[in-house]
Image (spheres, coloured by chain):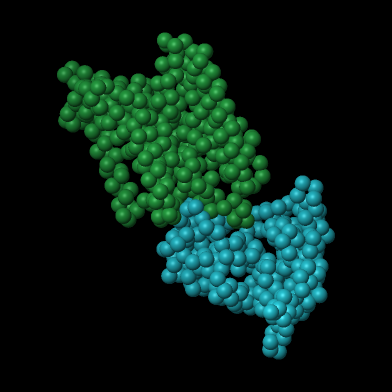
Amino acid sequence: MRIPSAFLLVALLLLACVGFALTTGQYHISLETLWKVLAAKFAGCAPNEDLATPAMVLWSVRLPRVLMAILAGAALSVGGVVFQGIMKNPLVSPSFLGVTHGAVFGASLAIIFLGKSAISIESSAFFWAVAAVAIVYAIGGRGINTLTTLVIAGVIVSTFFMAASSFLKYIADPNEQLPAIVFWTMGGLNNVLWTQVIRAMAIIVIGIGVILTFRGKLNLLALGDEEALSMGVNVKVMRILFMLFATLIVAAGSSSCGIIMWVDLIVAHIARLIVGPDHGKLVPFSALLGALFLLSTDTVVRLLPGGEIPISIVTSFIGAPLLGYLLMKQNNAWKA
Amino acid sequence: MMATLSARNLGFSYHRTPVISKVDIQIEGGVTALLGPNGSGKTTLLKLLLGLLKPAHGQVFLDGVDLQSLGHRQAAKRMAYVPQVHREAFAYQVEDVVLMGRMPHASFLSPYSREDREQAREAMERLGILHLARRPYTQVSGGERQLALIARAMTQGAQVFIMDEPTNGLDYGNQVRLLERLQTLAQGGLSFIFSTHHPDHALSVADRVVMMSQGQILRDGDAGTIDAESLEAIYGVDVRLFHVQSGIRVCVPGLRLRPIAC
């Protein structure tokens, strides 16, 4: 597939998916109604009375949820691309450097000690996700050839945070707090609020913008640290910058919707197979593809008969076998 | 104008173990071969010359300016690192790899201009790999990859090429072709310094040979510097040199000259 047509195809599919996600659900909204409600909203006037219910459903439930799915999907995938690039390995993801377990610890901490408000869970998860990566970097980020030590430091820090989270689960109130922790770790885009969408959007748009600005340097880092250094790239500073912004967007994407497994690794990997490793194309394409993947998964999860199930269960059921398949045929898949 | 790379009283240690000490070297045009056994400090010296490592003692000068004050970006416009052929994780197109050589010249926001692409294509054409431009770098042969890395260094605008065992991993034909290429490019005014484990490579193309042992320069001179004694001194094995034609010498390990016991 030529690259522009791949972009076009994914963009069209995403658009179709947005239309479908906004109109389908327990309360059905026709495309015509959707159009009227949006038109009224953009015109700045209140919708007619017969449109009050669909307007409410759209505005306070579906639209924030759809936007969050798009943002989180894009953020996780771009985070995956950046981490794979700076680690020079197409099969790693931010979770290898402690992001996931840091976020789980932060969310658990907030649920137990700070009450279960969205803002406290979100900010605590965000803070501890960034802190986990910072600790990983402090332990393993010395010298120039530090990629292996970084991954090992990631394992150390992840294990520590996992133990800390287990301890928190152990002391949590089994009726209220424990289920909240468990559900958060399984991820979900239900109950997304506009304030969360806007916070996430600000961080994610800026983060992806910065990453795109430095795409050329990311290409060099992905080729080799010493080569990049010999070509005038400040490897240490750039690596910290990329890790910082990738962690920020991943934390922003996952702190308001819990842990969503596999999206980062799988989408980044597949996007690279389609458009190649040049980050100028790969970053925007993986953002689109990640948005499409998470939005379609979330829509499926929402429409499943028998009620909604946590999204990580579905992404893992898709992601793990897919990665296994890619690993088995890696000679073609990695290098193609 | 030919670029000059020189080092004065260079020293470097890993964890207080000296790896390089009291090295003086000056490179100005031609092909310089760096010979020495494993652990003699060849790679460390090359990395110091490139500025990838900070010297513990002494200084490296590029056109008379201290490398530490010049900075990587400015140095990269005149001096390039051609690494050993390696297998990459990501399948960049050959063209993209060559284009990366324009990074030191690129402006902050838009990495590569039309002229940058033009220069990359020129370098590929000069090295005869233009037909590979759209092929994945990971799927061309080792020799072609080495040419792509040299093309990238040329795209960088470098006058001095620093190569760490460039023939490593190449088959015999590609080793010879690469050395011929270095000789041709050097005649065009570029300078090369490469480390090698093959004295014959030094004998065949080097205008100058630097022999290292235990972090110090043992000998430094034209290809005539290489003799049986110096090779035995640095490698610790029996070596003979033979004249096969006027001015052409080959190096043969002593073991082949012993009669085969029946």
Q: Position of residue B6 (x, y in %)?
A: 75, 64
Of A218 and B90, which appears nearest the observer?
B90
Q: Position of residue B237 (x, y in %)?
A: 76, 70
Residue furthest out toward the front: B262
Q: Residue at x 53, y 32 (%)?
A: A98
* Side of B207 where A54 appears, left or right: left
> Image quadrant of residue A294?
top left
Residue furthest out toward the bottom: B246
Q: Position of residue A191 (x, y in %)?
A: 35, 20
* Side of A231 where B133 appears, left or right: left
> Image quadrant of residue A313?
top left
Chain colored green: A
Q: Position of residue B210 (x, y in %)?
A: 75, 69
Q: Quadrant of the C terminus of chain A?
A: bottom left
Marks counted in the figure total 0
Of B35 and B137, which appears nearest the observer?
B35
Q: Residue at x 40, y 55 (%)?
A: A332
> Image quadrant of residue B217?
bottom right
Q: Quadrant of the N terminus of chain A?
A: bottom left
Q: Residue at x 76, y 68 (%)?
A: B235
Q: Above or below — where is A231 with respect to A214?
A: below
Of A256 and A34, which appears nearest the observer?
A256
Q: Above or below — where is A237 with respect to A28?
A: below
Q: Which color was chain B given?
A: cyan
Q: Residue at x 55, y 75 (%)?
A: B173
* Side of A212 where B255 appears, left or right: right
